[in-house]
Structure formats: structure tokens, C-alpha cells
Image (cartoon, rainbow, N blue to C red):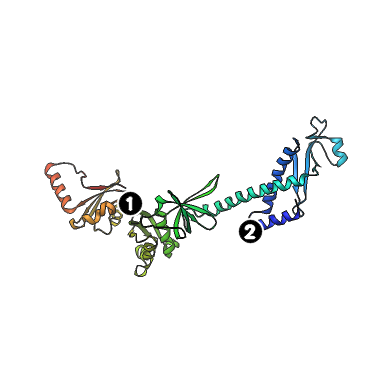
Amino acid sequence: MSKELIEALAEIEREKGISKDVLIEAIEAALISSYKRNFSTAQNVRVDINRTTGQIKVFARKTVVEEVFDPRLEISLEAARSINPLYNLDDIVEIEVTPSDFGRIAAQTAKQVVTQRIREAERGLIYNAFVDKEQDIVTGIVLRADQRNLYVDLGKAEAILPLTELMPGDRLKQGDRVKTFIVKVENTNKGPQIILSRTHPGLLKRLFELEVPEIFDGTVEIRSVAREAGQRSKIAVYSRNPEVDPIGACVGPRGTRVQTVVNELRGEKIDIVRWSENPEEYVANALSPSKVLEVIVFPEEKTARVIVPDNQLSLAIGIKGQNARLAAKLTGWKIDIKSESQAEEEFGRQRASGETMHQDGVTIDS
């Protein structure tokens, strides 16, 4: 060990943010094992590295006792006081036992420890840096791909973007910049594992939070998100300030705010609806852009029967049931949609037969 090594550790601290003291303490701990292994001793030892000069010393630590049974671990009171008259029973005496050729062993050990600890510390720093960004948006560069994943460079770390988490319109290749949502950050034996997504509803929510000042400052709140990535999404918004229109705030002047989000999501259609604590009103809003004549709720079953004009039935249901499906996900209610004529026909049939009303329309579960 030498002053040059201390300077090298200081340089590592400056460049990588890893404490020099942490590295030295790790080297000291490793040198204890090396000493016991190379010199076949079971002594209780302490290794000290001078933080300025890099000089190494090994000290045997012995407990002061009246009668010595194991000289490797114990020292008599008389012998201890010959070193320092102030020693008493049960005190710990340290006696230097540094081998003459310990420097060579120390250099090899230090190199191994520093390499290992730098790797571990960097992993820890990366984990700490990204665990706070979980459920947030990051921008990275596509590095490479395999059969299951894209690997994205986030600057300090490499993250995994599963191909299953790509939007239908994503055609990413090496070198492309991509905005993603951090779904999960895990600390594994191989280092931090960062999982990304382009399809997660959280991506849509965070894009609006970044784009709409009223959401950022808490005036407008996104209460729920339902998304079928790359195709269509719905968000339910609420304003804490009666003077602020939550839908207008999200749409922005001439639609600029919502259009920015749409562009980022490659043309994904977004319905912005007003959240309401009244389930009838909330379900009706969620079926936008279709018009709703009536909503009847069954709280015990958390089911809502919706009646729409005849010419709005297809719009309410949507292509392949998408509009109704998203509305059900958004509200958390099972939605049974009927046209006005279907409802009248059913009501007339039930009134004539005295049957109890039942649901036989188009039902969409959340």
C-alpha cells in the first residue's frame, strides 16, 4: 500500500461518488481475512490503513485476563501493564504484528476489493437513483434487442423494455430515443433491474401531469385512467377549484396540451371525462363521446344499466366493444348498455308478463 493508492481512491471518490473511507474500510476488512489465511492464525486482529500515507499495520487484539489460557487471544495483566500501566482486566490490548512481506498481499487484496466494491457501490448508487423514479417517465436510447426485450440506455443504467410493453405502432431500432415509464426497480444479485413500459396507464397519467400545470400544482386531479395502448384511452379528471374546468385544462388552448400527449403516444385517441362521486353521472360521462339518456345503478352488484338513443348504441359500445370496455375499466362498474327501443321493448314485455326486470343487453365488465 502507498500514498499513490490513497490518491487513486480519492480519484475514484471524485469520479464515481464512492466514499474513499468506505473503500478503505472494505480493504481493511478483506486484509484481516488475508492475514489469517496466509499466516495460519486464529488471532483476533485489526488492520489499519493510514488515510494519508497508505501505510498498513496489523494489530493483534488481546483481552487482559488474570490467567492466560489462549495466548493468541489473551494477555496477562502483568504483561499488559508492561506495555501501558493503565491497562486493567477485560481491557483490549493491541500489539502490532505486521508481517514484513504483507505489502504484496495487501496490494493484491486491495485491487480485488476495490474492483468489487466499486461494482457494488455503483450498483447501489444506480438503484438509489432509479428507485425514486419508479412510476415516473424517463427518456433513453435503444441499445440493442433480443427475442424478448429491448435494452435501453438511461445514462447511468441499462433498463429492460419488454417487447410486450411496446405500443402497436412502436418501431424502435438501435439508436432511437424513446420515452418510457418505469414500472419497477429491483435490486438483484446482478445489480439493479429496471423494467420499462410504453403501454402502462401510468405513462399516460405522467404525460398529462408534465403537460398540464393545473395537474402539476394539484388544482386538477386525475382520478382514474383506462388505456388500450396505441388505440384509445380514457382519463377521469376532477377540479378542486370550482372556477377551473378540469377538461379544459387538460385539453389546453386550441387542444395543444392533449395533442402533445397524443403525439407522444403515436396518435392514441384520448377521451377526457369529468369524474363525479355520483355513479350515475360518472358512468354517463365515461361513455363519452356517446350521449346517455339514463343510468340505473345496482350498488350491491356494482352494475350500471345504461340507456342510450338508438342512433348512439354503436358509438356507446365502440368498435369491438372498446368504448364500453374502457368506460367499465375507468369507473370500476359493470356496464349493461341498451338502446332506447330495446329498453322500451323489454319494459313492455316485462310489464305485460309481470316479470322481474333482468339484464339481457350488451354487458361490459370492468
The amino acid beneath tag 2 is Glu
Above or below for 324 versus 96 = below
The amino acid beneath tag 1 is Thr
The residue lying toward the viewer, choosing from 38 and 11, is: 38
- Please name which of the two marks, 1 or 2, marks the residue nearer to the observer: 2
Q: Is residue 242 left or right of residue 195?
A: left
Above or below for 156 versus 64 = below
Q: Is residue 281 left or right of residue 118?
A: left
Q: Residues within 10 Å of mark 2 (few under 14, many from 20)?
A: few
Image coords of residue 319 (percent x, y): 26, 54
Image coords of residue 37 (percent x, y): 72, 38
- Helix, strand or loop status at disc 2: helix
Image coords of residue 337 (percent x, y): 23, 50
* Numbered tag placed on residue 15 in the rendering: 2
| Number of numbered labels in the structure image | 2
Inspect this view and state whether residue 146 appears.
Answer: yes
Residue where numbered disc 1 is placed: 331
What is the C-alpha distance between the residues marked 1 and 2?
51 Å
The residue lying toward the viewer, choosing from 247 and 366, is: 366
* Numbered tag placed on residue 177 in the rendering: none
Above or below for 249 versus 118 = below
